[in-house]
Image (spheres, helix red, strand yellow):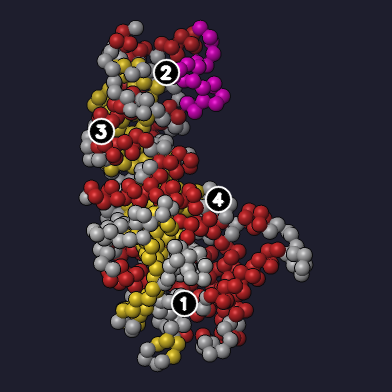
Amino acid sequence: MVVETQIRRFDSIELESGVVIAPVDVAYETYGALNAERSNAILLVHAFSGDAHAGGVDKDGQKGWWENMIGPGKGFDTNKYFVICSNVLGGCKGSTGPISIHAATGKRYGMTFPVITIGDMVRLQKMLIDSMGVRRLLSVAGGSMGGMQVLEWAVKYPEAVASAIPIASTARHSAQQIAFNEVGRQAIMADPDWNGGDYYDGKPPARGLSVARMVGHITYMSDASMREKFGRRLREDNGIFEVESYLRYRGSQFVDRFDANSYLYITKAMDLFDLGQGAQSLVLALPKSRTRFLVISFTSDWLYPSYQSLEIVSALRRRNQDVAYIELTSNYGHDAFLVTVEEQAELIGGFLTRTIKEASRV
Amino acid sequence: MRGEHGPLVHELFGRGDYGLISEIVEPGACVLDLGCGEGELLAWLAGNKNVDARGVEISPAKLQKAIARGVSAYQGDIESCLADYPDKAFDYVLLSQTLQEVRHPMQVMRDILRVGRKAIVAFPNFGHYSVRLAHLFNGRAPKTKLFPYDWWDSPNIHFLTVDDFEILAAREHWQIERRYFLSGTREVKSMPNLMAEVAVFVVSQV
């Protein structure tokens, strides 16, 4: 199916900080059809560098980032479900972010863009869902930073979420996760072309952004997957290691599709996210609700290790909340959430079917 | 063999203890199944008795099947997973053919009776005459229909009988609300310690 990203504009959004962005755009795609009761909508929330193009193929032939999970008969079965995915606030793929024109000045926001949070991203998604007339989502699902948004949804709008699927995610970043993000930010800001975030009329900070992405890709893989994929092999054409070549390629490719300022704002939003709001225990943060949870982690994911998922599961158990949890075996590190399709499709398919039955019971 | 002439029990998935559990659990109850395997029993209870079904399973492969069935199960060790739950979080906690496999059965029983209003405990009876005969005549670790494993790869690490459980329950002041004894698909009405292959106890904390 050929899909096209849509844009919906709202007059304004008030951020958690109290700052107002006006107007505000949200880029989104939908797959499948909303039923008459509007009860079959599923919101997919993307990871750090994702966008609204989750499923299908766009007019340039580009597959969505979760294309293998979305479609007829797939994990998110579009014969049954109406699937929505939107680009996050602060992003650079159609939703309002640092690259957008600030209406008041007629210039791009750059570093004048206000600090945003995971909560703000979710607030904009809620506005989009409301505008579609969807009161209660059958599910909210996503991996990595997507998982954080899933958790935020479950806490902020428990009545609007029948089920939640946080994958390879956490309720708050550890020092290690913040550290890797900080290396990425410093790489961008150390690039003279960054120019305090004011580079839209000139050259973007390509070297800095590319290095930031290279670090990111290391954290998304595992020792085993890198050994398998590259080993110590050298490229024949230029004599550098395969792994060096791969990282350089990924870095330079990223520069063409991502805005450096968005990198700064979104990684900061991830670092600031804390579902427990500083409390020792997550238990108090989670409202007692009817929301069913399916939590998934991966054995070789050292960026979002399983103990972080278990922390969420444990807190839900303490509330006696309905939660399923599985640690899937995979060598792919954090990338596993985009790679282990078959297992996740089976798990999520069964979980959603049961969620519908539960929803009709209430 | 008088046990062979007792009333037939209803079987579920080829198991008499499952059949009994499916009859004991009231509609709409909240049930936790420890060692839920692929979740067949829980899925049946959810589908047929509108039960709020939760499970714990240690094997990832079985757990995946259980979740795919729509059962809210998670990966965990029976001996450590119960600590999180509030008191009396469940109407029933099921421990089917697992008590003899856990390292610390007393701790597991105490945890179960804390988080569940009632526990349904089913276990193979080591006092069954076939086990006694096998041991007596072969002089080796019993290998029977009930205990089909060689000693070196058996998951069973505790060997208890019907009487052992009754004595422990009395000592610990557990209340045995109901007891069922099975031989194949028939209920055993007399001499259960000798005749029962499987015992099913409904237990609560006094």
Q: Is A244 situated above or below B1? A: below
Q: Nearer the viewer, residue A188 or A358?
A: A358
Label 3: few (<14), some (14–19) or many (≥20) C-alpha neighbours in 10 Å = some
Asked if badge 2 and badge 4 are on a common chain, one would say: no
Corner quadrant of residue A223: bottom right
Q: Amino acid at mark 3?
A: Val
Q: Marks 2 and 1, how far apart in space? A: 68 Å
Q: Chain of mark 2?
A: B
Foreground mark, 3 or 2, reads 3
Say what secondary structure mark 1 lies in. Answer: loop
How many dots with numbers?
4
- Image position of B194 (left or right of A160): right
Residue under circle 3? B25
Q: Marks 4 and 3, how far apart in space? A: 38 Å
Q: Which residues are magenta?
A: B137-156
Whether B57 is among the magenta residues is no
Residue A92 is at least partly visible in this image: yes
Corner quadrant of residue A172: bottom left
Q: Main secondary structure of the magenta part?
A: loop
Residue B126, which numbered label? 2
- Image position of A233 (left or right of B171): right
Q: Earlier in the sequence, mark 3 or mark 2?
A: 3
Q: Marks 3 and 1, how far apart in space? A: 54 Å
Asked if badge 4 and badge 1 are on a common chain, one would say: yes
Could you say where residue A287 lies in the image, as x and y percent from the top left?
29, 58
Residue at 25% x, 37% y: name it: B49
Residue at 48% x, 48% y: name it: A343
Quadrant where the N terminus of chain A is found in the figure: bottom left
Q: Amino acid at mark 1?
A: Cys
Residue under circle 4? A330
